[in-house]
């Protein structure tokens, strides 16, 4: 088992009919002037927005609508400016992972004296050193952003995505109400299932490290998502299905699975570029890249792929046969959710995409990725070419 340090201060308030606790928690963090940040308006149509406003009597609050599915830097700067104008001291993110990621950036950008893109671009000496507190009301189980300190921010005019995070960016609290799942379209539910699944395998399909507990916990999440995935898409109002999906998504990326194990994340890094180039949903880029990456890195991952095939898919045969069948089973699972698994399924403008992605990785100096640091830009090019 590898060395690790674990810290997660986020309070999870899980279950239905819990919003009456919002004033209590806001007062605990001495919030007086609150920004409600959300996406394109689905929370207004569902009635959730009004329920939240009803709980904010006695608090000064303003709203910011319009955080995109891939939160845009320029949009978030407008929210930062509103926070400054209104002297906001607490932000409430109401939505899925994109809204929550956007609010993490906003919370650091409000007190930052300078261009916050320099922080995202990792310019030397540029860092967020403080952040205003924030909480979340989760509407879409997928990214685990409600219980971690990481975020991904998009800047379309540069065709770039950037990651950020740190201990300051844990939500103070997160309301996780499984009844919200019933308000989601099938496409978002399918994306959420794949997102949670891929967060889990990025921390599991690496190489054995002797951390038996973490491996079994990862396998529990994967087996649960396979069991409930198609069912929850067809019947999202089933509270048992919805609550298990929401809790799986939180556990997939709350920091627990990474304890004492090697992690990969190369699939995410490559997938981010497909989103930046083509606007493909994040989860779908993962479904596109993952099977091809596992094939390209087969020898490095074979032992864990075989374990995964036996324990999750009940496969038999030689170790090589099981490992290969496990890759096929994973891709078929994604497809069973209605997720296409090739770049050409999403765009005809894919000529040369493998070269474009390789060049991005070379420009950023990303030359040693994956759990064994064995994925370089040329290997990335090979993986993307196979995914077309």
Image (cartoon, rainbow, N blue to C red):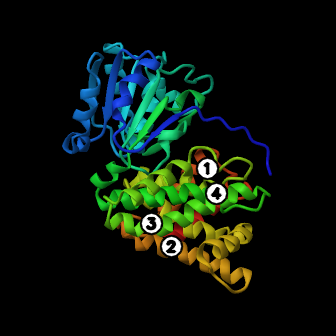
Q: Is residue 75 visible?
A: no
Give left or right: position of 321 versus 335.
right
**Mark number displayed over residue 228:** 3
Q: Which residue is mark 2?
A: 331
Looking at the image, which is closer to me, 228 or 104? 228
**Crowdedness near tag 3: few (<14), some (14–19) or many (≥20) residues, C-alpha within 10 Å:** some
Give left or right: position of 216 versus 53.
right
Query: Of label 3 and label 2, which has the lower sequence position?
Result: 3
**Mark number displayed over residue 362:** 1
The answer for how far apart the CA atoms under marks 1 and 3 are is 40 Å
Give left or right: position of 385 versus 209.
left
Looking at the image, which is closer to me, 74 or 158? 74
Q: Residue at x 54, y 59 (%)?
A: 198
Q: Are marks 2 and 4 in contact (CB under 8 Å)?
A: no
The answer for how far apart the CA atoms under marks 3 and 4 are is 17 Å
Q: Is 271 situated above or below 13?
A: below
The answer for how far apart the CA atoms under marks 4 and 1 are is 35 Å
Q: Are marks 3 and 4 in contact (CB under 8 Å)?
A: no
Q: Are marks 1 and 3 in contact (CB under 8 Å)?
A: no
Q: Is 352 situated above or below 56?
A: below
Question: At numbered mark 1, what does the secondary structure look like: helix, strand or loop?
Answer: helix
Residue 97 placement (x, y as % from top left): 42, 44
Q: Which residue is mark 4?
A: 217
Query: Of label 3 and label 4, which has the lower sequence position?
Result: 4
The answer for how far apart the CA atoms under marks 2 and 1 are is 29 Å
Question: At numbered mark 4, what does the secondary structure look like: helix, strand or loop?
Answer: helix
Q: Pick out the residue farthest to the bottom.
A: 317
Query: Of label 2 and label 4, which has the lower sequence position?
Result: 4
- Looking at the rendered image, the disc whose residue lies closer to the viewer, 2 or 4, is 4
The answer for how far apart the CA atoms under marks 2 and 4 are is 22 Å
Q: Are marks 3 and 2 in contact (CB under 8 Å)?
A: no
């Amino acid at each position: 088992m590898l060395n690790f340090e674990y810290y997660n201060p986020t309070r999870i308030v899980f279950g239905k009919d819990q919003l009456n606790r919002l004033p209590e928690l806001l007062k605990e963090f001495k919030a007086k002037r609150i920004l409600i940040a959300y996406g394109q308006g689905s929370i207004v149509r569902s009635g959730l927005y009004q329920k939240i406003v009803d709980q904010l009597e006695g608090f000064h609050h303003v709203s910011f609508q319009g955080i995109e599915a891939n939160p845009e830097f320029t949009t978030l700067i407008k929210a930062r400016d509103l926070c400054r104008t209104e002297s906001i001291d607490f932000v409430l993110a109401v939505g899925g992972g994109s809204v929550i990621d956007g609010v993490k950036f906003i919370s650091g950008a409000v007190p930052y004296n300078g261009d916050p893109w320099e922080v995202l671009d990792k310019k030397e000496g540029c860092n967020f050193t403080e952040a205003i507190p924030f909480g979340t009301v989760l509407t879409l189980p997928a990214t685990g952003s409600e219980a971690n300190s990481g975020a991904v921010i998009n800047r379309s005019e540069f065709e770039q995505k950037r990651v950020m995070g740190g201990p300051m960016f844990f939500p103070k609290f997160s309301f996780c109400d499984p009844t919200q799942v019933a308000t989601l379209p099938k496409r978002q539910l399918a994306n959420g299932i794949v997102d949670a699944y891929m967060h889990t395998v990025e921390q599991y399909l690496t190489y054995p490290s002797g951390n038996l507990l973490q491996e079994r916990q990862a396998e529990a999440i994967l087996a649960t998502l396979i069991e409930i995935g198609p069912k929850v898409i067809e019947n999202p109002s089933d509270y048992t299905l919805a609550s298990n999906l929401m809790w799986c998504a939180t556990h997939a990326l709350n920091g627990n699975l990474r304890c004492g194990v090697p992690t990969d994340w190369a699939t995410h890094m490559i997938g981010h570029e497909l989103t930046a180039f083509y606007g493909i949903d994040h989860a779908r880029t993962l479904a596109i890249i993952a099977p091809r990456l596992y094939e390209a890195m087969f020898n490095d991952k074979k032992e864990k792929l075989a374990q995964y095939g036996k324990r999750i898919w009940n496969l038999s045969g030689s170790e090589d046969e099981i490992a290969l069948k496990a890759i096929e089973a994973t891709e078929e699972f994604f497809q069973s959710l209605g997720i296409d698994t090739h770049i050409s399924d999403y765009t005809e403008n894919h000529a040369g995409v493998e070269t474009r992605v390789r060049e991005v990785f070379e420009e950023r100096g990303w030359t040693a990725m994956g759990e064994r640091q064995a994925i370089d830009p040329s290997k990335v090019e090979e993986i993307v070419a196979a995914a077309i």
